[in-house]
Image (cartoon, rainbow, N blue to C red):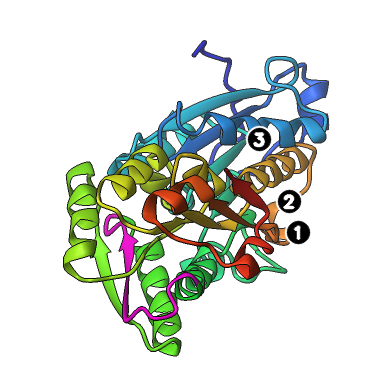
Amino acid sequence: MRRRDVITLAGGATATWLSWPALAQQGAMPVVGFINGGFADTYAVLAAAFVKGLGETGFSEGRNVAIEHRWAEGRSERLPALAADLVQRRVAVIAATSTPAALAAKAATASIPIVFETAADPVRLGLVASLNRPGGNVTGVTQLSAETVSKRIELLHELFPGAHAVALLVNPTNPTIAEAAASETMAAARSFGLQLHVLKAGTDDEVESAFAKVGELKASGLAISGGDPFFVSRNDKLAALAARYAVAAIGAGRAFAVAGGLMAYGGDITDAYRLAGTYVGRVLKGEKPADLPVQQATRIELSVNLKAAKAFGLTVPLTLLGRADHVIE
């Protein structure tokens, strides 16, 4: 990516940010630091949604705003250094898209504005004081995916009413999301009288081992934890493994079902990135993160892949199909 000129703000830990009108008067182009735990290619659609959100507030990349991208490429341990680099470059705003990225950005600066996109509860994470009054230099958008994972268990129960056990796939290298998902899923499984097996995978080899183990555990289906960059960037691989090991799996986003997975249920992550883009634009125009309530992405989608169901020899109940937002045939 072509290097952009970087705006130098007032120094010191108590520095305040320059709003867009002030920058415009100086003839300077504001720079947004975009940091994510995944890969540029697999997140291209989401990054484009972020840019679309910026555009809705009047900002166009290359015309009146520059974007510096930092991708951890599945290695969360790189995020603190990437966030520190953006702070050193004195970007105008940091867009921290993914929970680990948001935590790394908050730890890196208390002065540069941060707009996050997360699947977890930002209050529980310590990112903001409250959803309505964030306080400090941080605000953003949450999908609250930990809450939707319990619904995935309910959908598996609806598909397999006689099941005795189900499984949950989490990434142990992203403990915040993993622990919240396990807690929510355990409660849901218990309510349906199901035994829950929590499978952990943070590498490609571990993911394949987890899918292979589902059959050994006699689990009727597998729910995949949502909001994790590692899983989001591997929808094709996850769907292929589900087919290879005959695992009825339900993911978090429509992309999983499109890739060949049986079902997907979760927040519209594309819209969440767009909303994050609009907040970055508003901050660039002078609004303070402390005054911008955390937005909750409320659009929830259910996708069903009938081709995958046929391969599994499953008949999807009409009551479930009737609720689906997307049916893939």
Q: Residue at x 45, y 32 (%)?
A: 42
Alpha carbon of mark 3 to alpha carbon of mark 1: how far? 24 Å
Q: Quadrant of the C terminus?
A: top right
Q: Residue at x 50, y 27 (%)?
A: 69
Report the number of discs.
3
Marking on residue 105 = none
Q: Earlier in the sequence, mark 3 or mark 2?
A: 3
Q: Which residue matches tag 3?
A: 49
Q: Nearer the viewer, residue 157 or 198?
A: 157
- Name above or below for residue 2 compared with residue 142: above
Disc nearest the viewer among 3 and 2: 3
Instruction: Check contact, mark 1 vs mark 2: CB within 8 A.
Output: yes
> Does residue 127 appear in the picture of this structure?
yes
Q: Position of residue 165 (x, y in %)?
A: 30, 77
Q: Which residue matches tag 1?
A: 291
> Does residue 107 appear in the picture of this structure?
no
Element type at marker 2?
loop
Q: Which residue matches tag 2?
A: 288
Q: Is residue 185 left or right of residue 301?
A: left
Q: Position of residue 74 (x, y in %)?
A: 33, 39
Which amino acid lies under the numbered mark 1 shown in the image of this protein? Asp
Whether residue 41 appears in magenta in the rendering, the answer is no
